[in-house]
């Protein structure tokens, strides 16, 4: 598996903070982020048309409503063996972008489970922000910056960069893309462990570089490669494309001598190289470690990853600033090192500019001058340990784990907003929110806490920044964790979309998914998210047919809700003790408040304006029919805070059925309140289709008028600890061929139970019909007892099937007769875990029934107490 190297894990350290500042004059002159200043457009050559009521034009992508119902059913689809079929899976650090023709693009970190796909920034695209198709090449598509490769100590060859190759060693991180002058500009990070310090610890090198393309899908060429390009010399056959970009840049008076925005490396003793520097498989005779320029990169202070531009979400325009006499755009970058840095780049070339006067290599620079040297190299002109030319620190510092940040302005509220990813990405990631009326701070969360940390409080960084999204578990639903690597974008419909990646509490930890949420700003100017994923069609639900704030009545909102009140804290615990899905063998520590999914609590919003259930208090709906105020109190009547936000129609993707719901999303901005700075949101509960018999021994499911039947059904809590056995019984239409059986019937913790697939000639398992390495049956040729003739069963007709579980045995019955029995001798530890789990209790959101998507009816779960 290709692993993402987490830069923060080894970089927590304290530095002397000497902040630099510069004089800025902010304007906004209408440079669109989603359109060229010359009105140019680009149409993707292989865009899939995706509509709500139609089908995608490409069979590798599931469209609209069907995708909502299947996105989380089985992790990465087995059929998705290539990048084009990923849809939302394998998306890390998504950067959202919309082109002139309305097509959405997401550019993301080079990462995938199973090492599938082309290296060098993944691209996927969509017409509706719901269904996505992966591009069949990377954004770089073979055009790696050789200067960067040498500096980063990567091995690369043209063959490796043009195809999927498990030996490839390069990792590109967290890109950002803007369109200007009919060109697409991408700043992206690259990271590698290139050396060891005197204690033997790995020391990463990180860099941010510029690449440019004529098409949203690339190829993106290194900026200096374009400026230095000679006609007819391209080895990949894109000569005319490169020459056209070069001509456009020359018409703008722009030329690039190098591509680095900034670089960083911890001090690496030259005698302790981690590996021999090489390029195209050949050792470098004069490694850049011995070059004086390499040593200068130690002077950056900030971790050089996660670049982002600053724009106005109220208009979609990039923000412009006057630095010296130069018109510039603002950018941020940075990570666990010394925090998040604010810098400026030239409006035309996007080259970094000086934020102060300095002299370097005999040349004098004034504020606003373009730099043809990396910021870290320019910063060698400043005093030791100074941020200087590397930017102004606006958040974090002293090893605090903030990264993957986005800074944006809202001209309707007159605030700048900083949202960062926070913590270790495997177990405790989440997103912080803060704001300021000045671009260079001070940024404070809704509880009044500053994001600019110091030596005394940096270790408790998880307690700062309002948790705009984080790990949670709604009752009876799939649940999510580790949201981060975010971007925020205003689309051409005026919707503000928040994109992030997320892991789950029901699939393996290396499955990470793209999620999109719509952002709104409440009456106090704080951003709130629809915590349910964005959906594109609300025909008959909202006035404009979109996911929007539309008038609701009190009776629409009143009802029972599963609610999440965010929790922050500084307490840490061993991951193995926190009950995190798939983390039983991990001894590292994580922040409890962010690693453990916040469990929902039931609350009732009564139509008379009162609140009952876990919480009490009162609530009110404004005349607009969507602005909501919740005066929250605990069960004893103690005040917790006043939360303000919105109620709206939503689609809850995490449910197994009844997806449409009403949601509310609010925040308390009263710093004096006990829950000041926290978010509070909830989804209206669907009417339960499960019923328990009077003797409490049988659960039955009502499949009438249910659009999804029993497909991907989450089973509710059902205590079977006192039972000697229990069983699932149902009717199913068995297909005509066993070849159709490439799916699970029951799954838990990576263990799958399938309806038996046996070779009818010798009554043994046929692995060609199994799905997943932990499926049961388990192996080719394994003998099974009590086997019946199966060919008669697969006849396209209804049959009654019963699956009985005891401590050591699973038995399938077909039409009342024993079909096949799996005894303990055939079970692995994984299967015993599955059965043992059931012997305590069936638990919702852990068990999924009928992932095969069979036409199942009359489902009942019964305890055998004999």
Image (tube, rainbow, N blue to C red):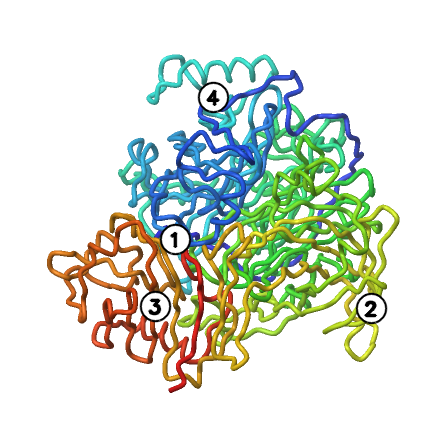
Circle 2 — which element?
A: loop
Spot occupied by residue 659 in the image (x, y as percentages of width and height): 59, 52
Spot occupied by residue 36 in the image (x, y as percentages of width and height): 63, 21
Q: Give the CA distance from mark 4 to mark 2.
A: 57 Å
761, above or below 222, in the image? below
Q: Which residue is mark 3?
A: 802
155, above or below 113, in the image? above
Q: Nearer the viewer, residue 345 or 264?
A: 345
Q: Which mark is residue 226?
A: 4
Instruction: Tell me the crowding category of disc 3: few under 14, some 14 to 19, or many 20 or more residues within 10 angstroms, Cα based.
Output: many
Circle 4 — which element?
A: helix
Precedes in sequence: disc 2 or disc 3: 2
Q: Nearer the viewer, mark 2 or mark 3?
A: 3
Q: Which residue is mark 1?
A: 854
Circle 1 — which element?
A: loop
Q: Which residue is mark 2?
A: 673
Q: Nearer the viewer, residue 411 or 723?
A: 723
Precedes in sequence: disc 1 or disc 4: 4
Q: Give the CA distance from mark 3 to mark 1.
A: 15 Å
Instruction: Tell me the crowding category of disc 4: few under 14, some 14 to 19, or many 20 or more residues within 10 angstroms, Cα based.
Output: many
Q: Nearer the viewer, mark 1 or mark 2?
A: 1
Q: Nearer the viewer, mark 1 or mark 4?
A: 1
Circle 3 — which element?
A: strand
Question: Can residue 188 be seen at all in this image of the molecule?
Answer: yes
Q: Nearer the viewer, residue 645 or 165?
A: 645
């Amino acid at each position: 598996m290709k692993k993402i190297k987490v830069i923060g894990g080894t970089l927590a350290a304290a530095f002397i903070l000497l902040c630099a500042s510069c004089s800025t004059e902010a304007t906004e002159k209408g440079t669109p982020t989603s359109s060229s200043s010359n009105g140019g457009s680009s149409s993707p050559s292989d865009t899939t048309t995706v509509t709500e009521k139609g089908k995608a034009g490409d069979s590798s992508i599931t469209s609209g409503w069907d995708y909502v119902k299947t996105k989380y059913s089985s992790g990465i689809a087995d059929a998705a063996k290539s990048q084009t079929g990923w849809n939302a899976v394998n998306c890390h650090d998504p950067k959202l972008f919309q082109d002139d023709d309305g097509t959405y693009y997401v550019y993301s970190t080079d990462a995938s489970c199973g090492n599938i796909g082309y290296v060098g920034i993944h691209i996927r695209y969509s017409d509706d922000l719901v269904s996505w198709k992966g591009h069949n090449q990377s954004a770089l598509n073979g055009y790696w910056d050789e200067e960067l490769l040498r500096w980063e100590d990567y091995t690369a060859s043209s063959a490796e960069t043009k195809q999927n190759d498990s030996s490839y060693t390069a990792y590109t991180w967290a890109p950002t893309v803007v369109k200007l002058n009919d060109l697409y500009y991408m700043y992206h990070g690259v990271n590698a462990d290139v050396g060891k310090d005197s204690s033997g610890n790995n020391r990463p090198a990180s860099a941010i570089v510029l690449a440019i393309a004529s098409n949203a899908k690339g190829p993106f060429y290194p900026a200096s490669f374009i400026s230095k390009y000679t006609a007819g010399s391209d080895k990949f056959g894109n000569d005319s494309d490169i020459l056209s970009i070069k001509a456009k840049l020359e018409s703008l008076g722009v030329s690039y001598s190098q591509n680095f925005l900034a670089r960083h490396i911890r001090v690496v003793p030259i005698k302790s190289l981690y590996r021999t520097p090489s390029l195209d498989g050949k050792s470098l005779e004069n490694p850049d470690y011995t070059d004086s320029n390499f040593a200068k990169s130690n002077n950056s202070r900030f971790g050089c990853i996660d670049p982002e531009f600053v724009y106005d979400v109220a208009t979609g325009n990039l923000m412009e600033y006057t630095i010296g006499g130069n018109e510039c755009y603002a950018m941020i970058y940075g990570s666990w090192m010394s925090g998040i840095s604010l810098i400026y780049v030239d409006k035309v070339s996007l080259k970094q500019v000086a934020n102060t006067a300095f002299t370097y290599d005999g040349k004098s620079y004034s504020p606003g001058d373009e730099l043809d040297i990396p910021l870290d190299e320019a910063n060698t002109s400043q005093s030791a340990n100074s941020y200087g030319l590397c930017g102004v620190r606006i958040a974090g510092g002293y090893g605090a784990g903030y990264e993957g940040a986005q800074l944006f302005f809202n001209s309707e509220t007159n605030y700048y907003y900083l949202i960062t990813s926070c913590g270790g990405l495997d177990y405790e990631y989440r997103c912080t929110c803060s704001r300021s009326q000045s671009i260079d701070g001070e940024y404070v969360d809704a509880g009044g806490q500053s994001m600019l940390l110091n030596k005394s409080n940096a270790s408790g960084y998880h307690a700062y920044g309002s948790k705009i999204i984080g790990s949670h578990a709604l009752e009876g639903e799939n649940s999510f964790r580790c949201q981060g690597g975010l971007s925020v974008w205003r689309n051409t419909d005026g919707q503000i979309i928040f994109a992030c990646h997320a892991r789950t509490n029901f699939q393996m930890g290396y499955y990470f998914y793209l999620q999109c949420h719509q952002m709104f700003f409440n009456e106090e100017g704080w951003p709130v998210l629809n915590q349910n994923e964005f959906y594109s069609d609300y025909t008959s639900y909202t006035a404009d047919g979109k996911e929007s704030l539309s008038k609701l009545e009190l009776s629409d909102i009143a009802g029972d809700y599963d609610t999440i009140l965010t929790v922050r804290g500084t307490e840490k615990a061993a991951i193995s003790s926190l009950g995190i899905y798939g983390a039983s063998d991990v001894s590292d520590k994580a922040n409890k408040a962010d690693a453990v999914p916040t469990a929902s609590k039931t609350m009732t919003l009564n139509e008379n304006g009162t609140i009952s259930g876990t919480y009490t208090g009162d609530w009110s709906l404004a005349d607009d029919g969507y602005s909501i105020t919740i005066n929250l109190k605990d069960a004893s009547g103690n005040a917790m805070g006043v939360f303000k936000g919105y109620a709206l129609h939503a689609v809850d993707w995490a449910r197994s059925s009844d997806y449409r719901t009403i949601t509310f999303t609010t925040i308390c901005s009263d710093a004096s309140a006990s829950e000041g700075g926290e978010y509070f949101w909830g989804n209206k509960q669907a009417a339960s289709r499960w019923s328990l018999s009077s003797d409490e021994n049988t659960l039955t499911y009502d499949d009438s008028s249910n659009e999804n039947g029993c497909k991907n059904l989450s089973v509710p809590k059902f205590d079977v600890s006192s039972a000697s056995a229990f069983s699932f019984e149902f009717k199913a239409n068995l297909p005509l061929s066993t070849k159709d059986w490439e799916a699970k019937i029951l799954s838990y913790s990576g263990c799958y139970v399938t309806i038996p697939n046996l070779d009818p000639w010798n009554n043994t398992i046929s692995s060609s019909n199994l799905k997943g390495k932990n499926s049961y049956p388990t192996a080719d040729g394994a003998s099974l007892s009590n086997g019946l003739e199966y060919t008669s069963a697969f006849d396209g007709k209804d049959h009654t099937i019963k699956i009985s579980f005891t401590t050591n045995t699973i038995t399938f019955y077909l039409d009342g007769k024993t079909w096949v029995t799996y005894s303990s001798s055939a079970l692995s530890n994984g299967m015993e875990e599955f059965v043992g789990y059931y012997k305590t209790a069936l638990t919702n959101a852990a068990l999924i029934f009928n992932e095969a998507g069979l036409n199942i009816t009359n489902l009942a779960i019964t305890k055998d107490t004999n």
